[in-house]
Image (spheres, rainbow, N blue to C red):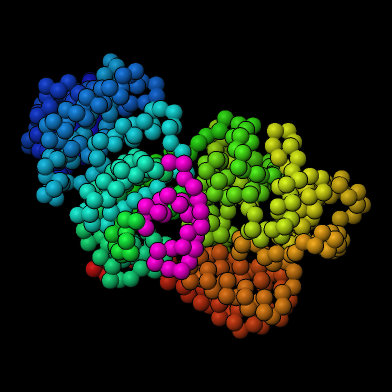
């Protein structure tokens, strides 16, 4: 379909293969010709499948929105429902403004509400009109949602939809933001293979016997009200994870140990990843909710002001930005609380590159804590360290937070901890002296020459004095710069294998590179390491091939 505008006349031309859309558009426009919120049909060309319509303005925006736009939209929704019409795609692109009046366009794929129950509808994705107000609000008003509070709930068989929806509505901990009905074959927009799509959606290997996506599904975008994160034992495994406790309790109650009934993401990063699989692109709904609702701070001062308001959150800036390209390194007492207050998003995840500092976000079953916030039109990157993550000894981390100092609007470690955390970072996280630290080291220690061996001696003496341990960071792509014994090397090999099995091939290669770089030369002769190298490259190539093949071919159905 193509659209052109000439002398205040809109011409919509349909392709011959889209004949049903041409007649559907005409049907609804004629039905609503007295409604005063749709374009008028001026001329219909049945030979060339073209409709000439009256011009009804520009896409609704912050600048042109009428003061009573909400009242007008509610009137339109009421009128549609009264006339058995489900528009199914009310979004800013389809809501136009002219002379302070709003007009609804694009009825080509609209359907009768009564036909939904009969499974008669034209679109792969039906967005329920009832929740269109949230879609419009997202584009034309100040954001009323906090992205980190959004979750995704999937009803894998629409037969269970009424039962599940009642449970959601009666639960005071949630609010439905949007509701989408998807055809069972919608996944072919991303991958042609059903099992492979489910496998990617869950981010783990799924049984080929699953019945998921053999029926049309219902997806809800829900807001978790004042989420509380607690450790919970998973329903179908002995594993314990820190999750949105209210969401998890709801999931447990609804499922009652039944597989394949629903899926609910119990943290933001999983939700964001899930939403993409139901969207055509990241800029389409429902994925758009997760990216466009992120809080935008007016300045760094505004960001720190929000952190300082929280009575439960403790933080220190370990290393601030020297340039805009650098990260801010921050230590917090509660990672999940910080994520919500800062409304930050993870930006590192496993990928199919050969080697990178990658892995799944901490909340989504991984170990990466690389996040970003938005300040005006800029992205500021943060590495968020937390108590118990092995970045420093836990006892030391607690001491750093308890003895923090307020400095120029934010908290930093006291002078002693500021000095020795940096020295430890150089010695045990980097394994080398970065140029950006030299000025600081000369100023603090008044050393004429800065040598790595000297820093190691200073750090080790301090650790011994304070009885702090050298710890292995939970972030596995941080190298181990000291020499490991045979047992510890075998443990590292197992961690590499776990990442390969979790399909973090790029991150596994980074871990292997770190071992080769910092351990003794005899590691080059270790047969177990080289079997891991081969296993990882084979798995990476295999995964790359699957991603290409299943975009075009279907193997399992």
Residue 204 location (% of width, % of height): 41, 66
User: Which residue is the extreme one toward the top?
Assistant: 99
- Quadrant location of residue 424? bottom right
Q: Is residue 101 above or below residue 431?
A: above
Residue 116 location (% of width, % of height): 15, 46
Judge left or right: residue 452 versus residue 51: right
Residue 409 location (% of width, % of height): 70, 33
Q: Is residue 468 above or below residue 46?
A: below
Q: Residue at x 26, y 22 (%)?
A: 72
Q: Is residue 86 magenta?
A: no
Judge left or right: residue 105 versus residue 550: left
Quadrant assignment for the N terminus: top left
Q: Nearer the viewer, residue 469 or 328?
A: 469
Residue 187 location (% of width, % of height): 29, 56
User: Would you say residue 16 is visible in this rendering?
Assistant: no
Q: How many marks?
A: 0
Q: Residue at x 21, y 27 (%)?
A: 76
- Quadrant location of residue 485? bottom right
User: Which residue is the extreme one toward the left?
Assistant: 46
Q: Is residue 235 magenta?
A: yes
Q: Residue at x 46, y 63 (%)?
A: 233
Q: Which residues are magenta?
A: 225-252
User: Would you say residue 316 is visible in this rendering?
Assistant: yes
Q: Is residue 426 above or below residue 24?
A: below
Q: Nearer the viewer, residue 159 or 437?
A: 159
Judge left or right: residue 155 versus residue 146: left
Q: Residue at x 49, y 63 (%)?
A: 240
Q: Nearer the viewer, residue 385 or 172?
A: 172
Quadrant assignment for the C terminus: bottom left
């Amino acid at each position: 379909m193509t659209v052109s505008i000439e002398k205040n006349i809109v011409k919509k031309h349909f392709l011959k293969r889209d004949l049903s859309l041409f007649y559907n558009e005409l049907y609804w426009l004629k039905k609503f010709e007295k409604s005063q919120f749709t374009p008028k049909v001026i001329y219909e060309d049945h030979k060339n499948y073209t409709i000439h319509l009256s011009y009804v303005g520009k896409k609704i925006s912050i600048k042109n929105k009428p003061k009573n736009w909400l009242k007008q939209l509610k009137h339109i929704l009421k009128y549609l429902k009264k006339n058995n019409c489900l528009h199914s795609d009310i979004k800013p692109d389809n809501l136009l403004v002219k002379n302070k009046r709003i007009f609804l366009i694009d009825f080509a794929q609209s359907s009768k509400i009564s036909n939904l129950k009969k499974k008669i509808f034209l679109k792969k994705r039906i967005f329920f009109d009832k929740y269109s107000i949230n879609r419009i609000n997202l584009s034309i008003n100040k954001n009323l949602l906090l992205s980190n509070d959004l979750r995704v709930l999937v009803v894998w068989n629409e037969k269970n939809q009424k039962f599940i929806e009642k449970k959601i509505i009666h639960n005071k901990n949630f609010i439905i933001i949007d509701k989408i009905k998807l055809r069972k074959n919608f996944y072919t927009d991303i991958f042609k293979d059903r099992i492979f799509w489910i496998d990617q959606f869950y981010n783990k290997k799924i049984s080929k016997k699953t019945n998921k996506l053999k029926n049309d599904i219902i997806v809800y975008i829900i807001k978790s009200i004042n989420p509380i994160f607690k450790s919970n034992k998973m329903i179908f495994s002995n594993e314990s994870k820190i999750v949105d406790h209210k969401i998890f309790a709801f999931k447990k109650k609804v499922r009652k140990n039944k597989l394949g009934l629903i899926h609910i993401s119990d943290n933001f990063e999983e939700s964001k990843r899930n939403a993409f699989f139901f969207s055509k692109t990241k800029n389409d709904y429902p994925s758009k909710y997760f990216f466009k609702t992120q809080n935008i701070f007016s300045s760094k001062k505004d960001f720190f002001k929000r952190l300082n308001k929280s009575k439960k959150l403790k933080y220190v800036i370990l290393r601030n930005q020297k340039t805009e390209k650098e990260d801010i390194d921050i230590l917090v007492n509660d990672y999940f609380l910080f994520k919500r207050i800062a409304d930050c998003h993870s930006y590192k995840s496993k990928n199919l590159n050969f080697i990178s500092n990658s892995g799944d976000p901490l909340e989504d079953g991984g170990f990466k804590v690389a996040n970003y916030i938005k300040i005006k039109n800029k992205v500021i990157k943060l590495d968020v360290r937390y108590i118990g993550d092995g970045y420093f000894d836990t006892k030391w981390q607690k001491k750093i937070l308890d003895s923090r100092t307020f400095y120029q609007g934010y908290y930093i470690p006291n002078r002693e901890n500021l000095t020795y955390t940096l020295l430890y970072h150089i010695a045990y996280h980097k394994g080398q002296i970065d140029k950006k630290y030299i000025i600081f080291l000369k100023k603090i220690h008044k050393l004429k020459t800065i040598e790595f061996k000297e820093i190691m001696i200073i750090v080790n003496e301090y650790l011994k004095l304070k009885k702090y341990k050298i710890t292995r960071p939970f972030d596995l792509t941080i190298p181990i710069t000291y020499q490991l014994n045979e047992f510890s090397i075998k443990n590292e090999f197992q961690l590499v294998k776990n990442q390969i099995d979790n399909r973090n091939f790029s991150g596994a290669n980074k871990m292997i590179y770190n071992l080769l770089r910092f351990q003794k030369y005899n590691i080059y002769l270790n047969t177990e390491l080289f079997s891991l190298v081969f296993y990882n490259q084979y798995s990476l190539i295999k995964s790359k091939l699957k991603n290409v093949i299943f975009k075009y071919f279907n193997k399992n159905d």
